[in-house]
Amino acid sequence: MRLLMALAALLTTVLAAPVLAQPAAPTQAPAIREFDIATIERLGRTIYRQDSAAWRATDALQAQLKDIHGAGVKGWIVEGEGDVQRVRFLRDVGHGLEAGYDVEVGPKGETRVSEPAERSLAPEERAAFAARQTAVAHLTQVCRAGYNSVVLKDPGGDGWLVWLLAPMVKAGEVPIGGHYRFTISADGATVVRMDALSRSCLVMTAPAPASGIKPVAIFVTHVVSPTPVETHVFLQMQAGQPMYVMAGGQVWKIDGGHIAPPRPLDGKP
């Protein structure tokens, strides 16, 4: 009862309207690789940009090719962390992996499809793609079909981080659980560690529009680390709603891709 009262005091502004809430979870969990808050924010925002760029680029390329798989496309890598990102689709048309198509995705989602003059891949491009393939090959438990992937340089080493993200199957759903982070070697060939970023496959579903209920925030509990993780930042941006994460005995607010300083559960500053 004291815990519920403390949460009520802390979230007064949120409870003025409905909130998507997650059931309580056990407090014990295996440790995962942890990052500082600034790095978690940056990774989450970059995951969001890359994921958005990848599906926009796929739609743009499919509109031109009609049959992506028939064109030998094997996957993609995303390059650039600024306003314009390049999604490079790799293909194999019988003489090895090469650059097939480039799609530039602008800050407003605009796309431009082109074919590269130079088809050969740089060593880092091959390693990034190999890292993705290695992570996929080592994913043994999935929550649903159609996992998405994001590959970034490891901020704490010379290798790669690969996220395999449980997809949002339909509008109004927020896949809180089922996401994995892989730490991969620099050559893309070896899994250094795999971290499950949640303990369940939880999907939160917003009330139907016909109900007249419009949630204003998402509230989740998190037990695999004492702070939110980068997928919380990604999901908050994807959902377009503030997210409150209860982790490490504190409540963390995420909004606009930023994590605010935590508040203790007793509601005191």
Image (cartoon, helix red, strand yellow):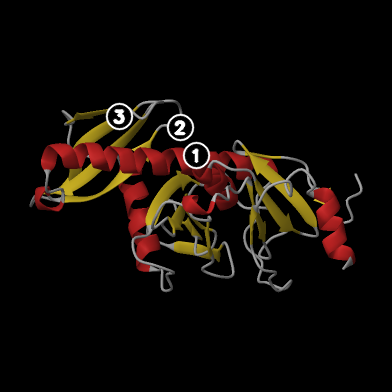
Q: Earlier in the sequence, mark 1 or mark 3?
A: 1
On screen, residue 70 above or below 62: below
Cα separation, mark 2 vs mark 3, equals: 12 Å
Circle 3: is it few (<14), some (14-19), or many (20+) Cα within 10 Å?
many
**Badges 2 and 3: C-beta atoms under 8 Å apart?**
no
Query: Residue beneath label 2, please?
Result: 81
Q: Earlier in the sequence, mark 2 or mark 3?
A: 2
User: What residue is drawn where x is 41% and y is 44%?
Assistant: 51
Tag 3: amino acid: Glu
User: What residue is drawn where x is 32% and y is 50%?
Assistant: 129
Query: Residue beneath label 1, please?
Result: 46
Which quadrant is the C terminus positioned in?
top right
Q: Can you give x and y, in whole percent of width and height, for residue 202 in the image?
A: 54, 66
Query: Residue beneath label 3, please?
Result: 104
Cα separation, mark 1 vs mark 2, equals: 7 Å
On screen, residue 126 above or below 143: above
Tag 1: amino acid: Thr
Most foreground residue, 174 or 37: 174
**Badges 1 and 3: C-beta atoms under 8 Å apart?**
no
Which quadrant is the N terminus positioned in?
bottom right
Tag 2: amino acid: Glu
**Badges 1 and 2: C-beta atoms under 8 Å apart?**
yes
